[in-house]
């Protein structure tokens, strides 16, 4: 049953994330353009569609998902019958928005093993439409939980769920297993069965929305975040364990993708006091 809501946001903008619109089981029948504004999560419930970003079209088959940040514009087109669900959202805490999806502008992912999102979307919808008292807070909590799940899908244990073909499986496996070492494009080409560098980069960009070396850098940042959250290693030790040979480059890269320094990130996540021995 189709359910669509554009809730009246009151105190929601003070929450970490807040819902600006939600739609469940909507049949997309015509070309539509999503303008920049809030972040967007879109899921293909049935059929197949297509999104065009920066002039390149990407297929969105059944059980696939798409994330667009507030700056990325996408044009959508149904390929036959295309039933979708979506939730658009803003972030009331700036750092929260910077940390989502490792700072990616957009990405696609496979949701076939994560049917839980259907239940979560229904609970978000019920919260914003039926609960006039605590609905915004409850919807924010459910949405934040969904975002945490999707971040896990795209990093760590969920890294193999990105939409891909066998060559992409081989490339991503090579990076995931060797990201702490220096990996060249030539090594990735050989791991994928002898693809040319040009074709490999184009294939990887179409599947993930980024270049292979950018994926490797984000993979290292993901590992560094885990070390900062779960260990008492110094920043220099975290950098080395994550594959960074140069601590200054690690600082610059970490700040680029998270919006904060490694030490501030550790304090932000754990509430830890600064260690004077940390660089």
Image (cartoon, rainbow, N blue to C red):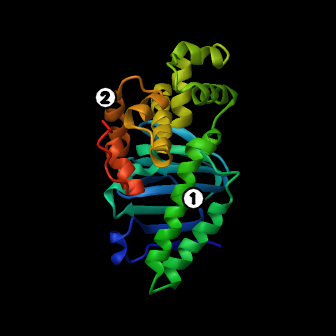
Could you say which is closer to the camera, residue 122 or residue 244?
A: 244
The image shows residue 81, relative to residue 249, as above or below, that is: below
Kindly give the residue lying farthest to the bottom in the view shown: 133
Quadrant of the image occupied by residue 162: top right
Q: Is residue 172 visible?
A: yes
Residue 125: x %, y % from top left: 54, 74
The image shows residue 60, relative to residue 212, as above or below, that is: below
Could you say which is closer to the camera, residue 162 or residue 73?
A: 162
Q: On the image, numbered disc 2 is attached to which residue?
A: 248
Instruction: Mark 2 or mark 1: name the one nearer the start of the chain.
Output: 1
Residue found at x 32% / y 42%: 261
Q: Residues within 10 Å of mark 1 (few under 14, many from 20)?
A: some
Residue 132: x %, y % from top left: 45, 86
Q: Quadrant of the C terminus?
A: top left
The image's mark for residue 28 is 1
Residue 133: x %, y % from top left: 44, 87
Kindly state the secondary structure of the residue where label 1 is placed: loop
Q: Quadrant of the N terminus?
A: bottom right
């Amino acid at each position: 049953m189709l359910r669509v809501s554009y809730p009246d946001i009151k105190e929601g903008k003070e929450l970490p994330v807040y819902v600006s619109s939600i739609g469940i089981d909507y049949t997309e029948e015509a070309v539509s353009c999503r303008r920049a504004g809030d972040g967007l999560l879109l899921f293909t419930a049935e059929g197949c569609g297509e999104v065009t970003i920066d002039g390149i079209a990407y297929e969105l088959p059944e059980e696939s998902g798409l994330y667009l940040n507030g700056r990325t514009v996408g044009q959508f087109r149904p390929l036959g019958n295309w039933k979708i669900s979506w939730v658009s959202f803003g972030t009331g805490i700036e750092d929260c928005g910077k940390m989502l999806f490792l700072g990616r502008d957009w990405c696609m992912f496979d949701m076939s093993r994560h049917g839980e999102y259907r239940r979560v979307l229904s609970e978000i919808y019920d919260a914003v439409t039926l609960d006039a008292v605590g609905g915004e807070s409850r919807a924010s909590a459910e949405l934040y939980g969904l975002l945490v799940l999707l971040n896990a899908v795209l990093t760590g244990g969920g890294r193999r769920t990105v939409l891909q073909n066998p060559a992409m499986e081989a490339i991503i496996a090579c990076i995931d297993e060797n990201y702490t070492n220096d990996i060249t494009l030539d090594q990735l080409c050989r791991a994928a069965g002898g693809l040319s560098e040009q074709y490999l980069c184009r294939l990887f960009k179409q599947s993930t929305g980024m270049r292979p070396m950018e994926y490797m850098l984000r993979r290292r940042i993901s590992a560094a975040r885990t070390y900062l959250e779960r260990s008492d290693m110094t920043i220099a030790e975290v950098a080395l364990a994550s594959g960074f040979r140069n601590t200054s480059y690690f600082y610059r890269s970490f700040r680029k993708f998270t919006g904060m320094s490694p030490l501030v990130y550790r304090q932000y996540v754990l509430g830890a006091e600064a260690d004077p021995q940390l660089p």
